Image (cartoon, rainbow, N blue to C red):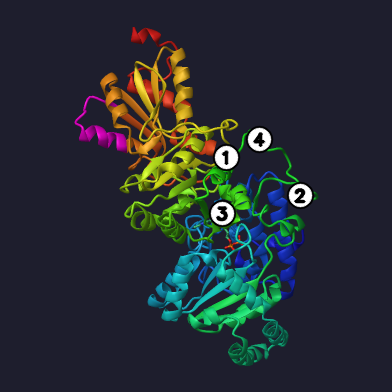
Amino acid sequence: MSDFFEKINFPSDLRKMNKEDLPVLAQEVRDFLIDYKSKESGTGHFGAGLGVVELTIAIHYVFDTPKDKLVWDVGHQAYPHKILTGRKNIFNTNRKYGGLAGFPKISESEYDTFGVGHASTSISAGLGFACGMALNGVNNNTIAVIGDGAMTGGIAFEGLNNAGALNKKLIVVLNDNKMSISPNVGAINNYLTSVMATSTYKRLKDGIWEVAGSIKPIGRQLQKIAGRIEEGLKGLVSPGVLFERLGFNYFGPIDGHDVIHLVDVLEHLKTLEGPILLHTLTVKGKGFKFAEDDAVKWHATGDFDKETGLPLKKSKGTSYPKYQDVFGETMAELGEKNKKIVAVTAAMLEGTGLAPFADKFPERFFDVGIAEQHAVTFCGSLAIEGLVPVCAIYSSFLQRAFDQLIHDIALQNLNVVFAMDRSGLVGEDGPTHHGSFDLSYLRLIPNFVVLAPKDQDEMRGMLKFATEYKKGPVAIRYPRGNALDLPKAGFMNIEFGKSEKLREGKNIVIIGVGTTVNWCLEAAAELEKEGIFCEVINLRFVKPIDREMLLEVAAKFDKMLTVEENTLVGGAGSAILEFYQENKIKHLDIVRLGIPDKFIEHGSPKELYEEIGLTPSNIRAQVRKLLNLPATNKNLAESFK
Ligand SMILES: Cc1ncc(C[n+]2csc(CCOP(=O)(O)OP(=O)(O)O)c2C)c(N)n1
């Protein structure tokens, strides 16, 4: 490691460097990242950060951050930014409980101008800064860095549309690596590819920038001339015409790994007014062979051997498949029997597990880009056409499409199936990615059927139920991580609106939702050893709720615990409270366990569950409390005689 990396803690240190030394620093940042990620770092994003090392250095070198506002899109590429903005020495806490977040976060650093985790927000956020600073009489720059994947999201275009008209000074850097998590898709991607392929333009333009960049101090003068020549060229071949017509001044495409050239170009762009789009070409995973060769696999990674690229240690998890894979295999199985089933993903082919379906039925598979709102509405009319769309979107990303769920799907009572992976707490990705709200935001929508399976077999059964339901929208929410067992062949029967009694009891009833049911069972088994007999119900249908069961348990018990991995605000426990209130049933003493009304930070799932008390041991403690028993009495049988 040379002195550069050691000496640089903040962009102010970076700006003291000679421009010619920046490539060395870039290599060192890259080495640090590869080294760090290969060791005891846990899982985390990898390829995207390596792809923007030079861009990050050049932006902080040229602009006066944090006064000039740098806004990242998605934020999964911000590791080099964190390293160069005062967090190098604590980077080993990245994504760990109580440590640095895996995404930019305004409470973490003044250099993190806008919190992010979901895609396509940077242009809108950047424009807000540009307008806000102008109104405040502050003349600083705003730079938004957005990937070609994030550029497929509708809000990015809403931002471009508004920015082009407002004509404020905003530099949008398009980080074009041709990849989303999977290879990028769609017409915008095709368009960007065609820009690159405009070889006459590229050759001429590269020549211009080379000349302009290499001759100083008249370089700037030359660049102005270059700008004018460019205007002429634009008329000829129109490479950035899309952005130009939206009111942006388009520059590029340029090599996003040539840090010196990047600095020259950015220096020039800094002098211009109005909205600017700089198109940079980068390689995801740049500098680490394995990641360059397989960008999909190395989008995120656990620890690995730097020499071989192989995982350092075998996964600590079980050998059982992930829920996403059970979902994907089940989709392929159901798709075989029912040719009307179509699958839709918003740029999450791998994450949703839909690859087996996509391989088998490519004509019935749609990757719509990072476009959750579009995905939902698109499914609506597919359903009207008599197809059975299964829209697979993570719980937190579906938040994006709340109005579409109401206006386009539920209001017209369309039979669309929503497969919502990553419900509940996802762990290290933190609050932007936790699926904490879905039961609440779905339960309030008329016509929706809302399901939560306790395990992989129930998930399979629910998927079959949902694809055969035909009467309206059905959402199935299931967690990140491994299933509890190998899924069984065949499908369990799911009866509409019916819960499942799993354990008879006499002292208290516990109603669990989704995978928390297993913790309820575990707690009940322990409590039985102490002489406490819990009835355990698997709610299955959060909507419509099983009224018959609720009346039955109300007749039998006066104590109830509800357990769900969802916010306590408006979730399944709330639905139960509402039901009893509406039916004037007042004798029940009900305690609800779930996610409290605050944002839960990042950390391992275990740490987060401990923090909020969503554990079998807290279920036991709450049961004891409800029964007015001492917290840890191991010999309670006497109390119930
Ligand atoms: C709204 C939303 N949907 C999906 C995702 C999941 N996601 C994270 S990164 C990513 C790909 C982003 O591609 P791009 O912007 O080109 O950045 P790159 O990883 O190629 O650097 C996706 C789909 C997300 N973060 N937000």
Q: Quadrant of residue 173?
A: bottom right
| Residue 203 versus residue 499 in the image, above or below | below
- Which quadrant: the N terminus? bottom right
Density class for disc 3 (Cα within 10 Å; few <14, some 14-19, many ≥20) is many
Q: Earlier in the sequence, mark 3 or mark 4?
A: 4
Where's residue 6, x and y in %?
71, 59
Where's residue 251, x and y in %?
60, 81
SS category of the residue bearing label 3: loop
Q: Earlier in the sequence, mark 2 or mark 1?
A: 2
Q: Is mark 2 within 8 Å of ligand 1?
A: no
Residue at the extreme right: 307
Q: Which residues are magenta?
A: 575-589
**Mark 4 or 1: the one toward you:** 1
Q: CA distance from mark 3 to mark 2?
A: 24 Å
Q: Nearer the viewer, residue 391 or 467?
A: 467
Disc on res. 326: 1
Q: Which residue is mark 4?
A: 316
Where's residue 9, x and y in %?
63, 61
Q: Quadrant of residue 280?
A: bottom right
Q: Which residue is mark 3?
A: 348
Q: Which residue is mark 2?
A: 309
Name the residue located 66 percent from the left edge and 57 percent from the top edge.
Answer: 47
SS category of the residue bearing label 2: loop
Q: Is mark 3 within 8 Å of ligand 1?
A: yes
Q: Nearer the viewer, residue 285 or 148?
A: 148
| Residue 372 versus residue 588 in the image, above or below | below
- Which quadrant: the C terminus? top left
Q: CA distance from mark 2 to mark 1?
A: 27 Å
